[in-house]
Amino acid sequence: MIFSENFTSEHYIAKEVLPMPVYVYQCKNCEYIFEQHQSFSEDALKTCPECDQDQLRKKFGNVGVVFKGSGFYANDSKKSADS
């Protein structure tokens, strides 16, 4: 996860389990980055809490997915030349 110099530990809840997903926002104006717990049905935030400009955008990162077992690679599903 990417954090700005503005990010403090009070923005992060280490052990509390919340039923809502966490979204990361970044302001295009002042580049402030923060996390926000929101339900799926809530509209995306638009106004930056630091500079009060309507320049917020959700940041999307890579999702770490690991596929284990057979059948996930091209050579796992091909028939051998001998058969």
Image: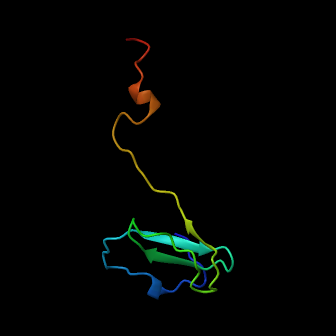
User: Observer-nearest residue: 62 or 73?
Assistant: 62
Q: Residue at x 53, y 78 (%)?
A: 34
Q: Residue at x 64, y 74 (%)?
A: 55
Quadrant location of residue 31? bottom right
User: Observer-nearest residue: 12 or 72?
Assistant: 12
Is residue 24 shown left or right of residue 4? left
User: Observer-nearest residue: 14 or 18?
Assistant: 18
Q: Residue at x 44, y 34 (%)?
A: 73
User: Observer-nearest residue: 41 or 6?
Assistant: 41
Identity of the residue furthest to the right in this view? 29
Quadrant location of residue 21? bottom left
Q: Residue at x 32, y 74 (%)?
A: 18
> What is the quadrant of the C terminus in the image?
top left
Quadrant location of residue 4? bottom right
Q: Is residue 83 above or below residue 25?
A: above
Is residue 26 shown left or right of residue 72? right
Is residue 50 shown left or right of residue 76? right
Whole-percent x and y of residue 12?
43, 81
- The total number of labels drawn is 0
Whole-percent x and y of residue 17?
30, 75
Q: Is residue 74 above or below residue 62?
A: above
Whole-percent x and y of residue 15?
32, 79
Whole-percent x and y of residue 74?
46, 30
Looking at the picture, the colour scheme in use is: rainbow
Q: Is residue 27 above or below residue 82?
A: below
Q: Is residue 25 above or below residue 67?
A: below
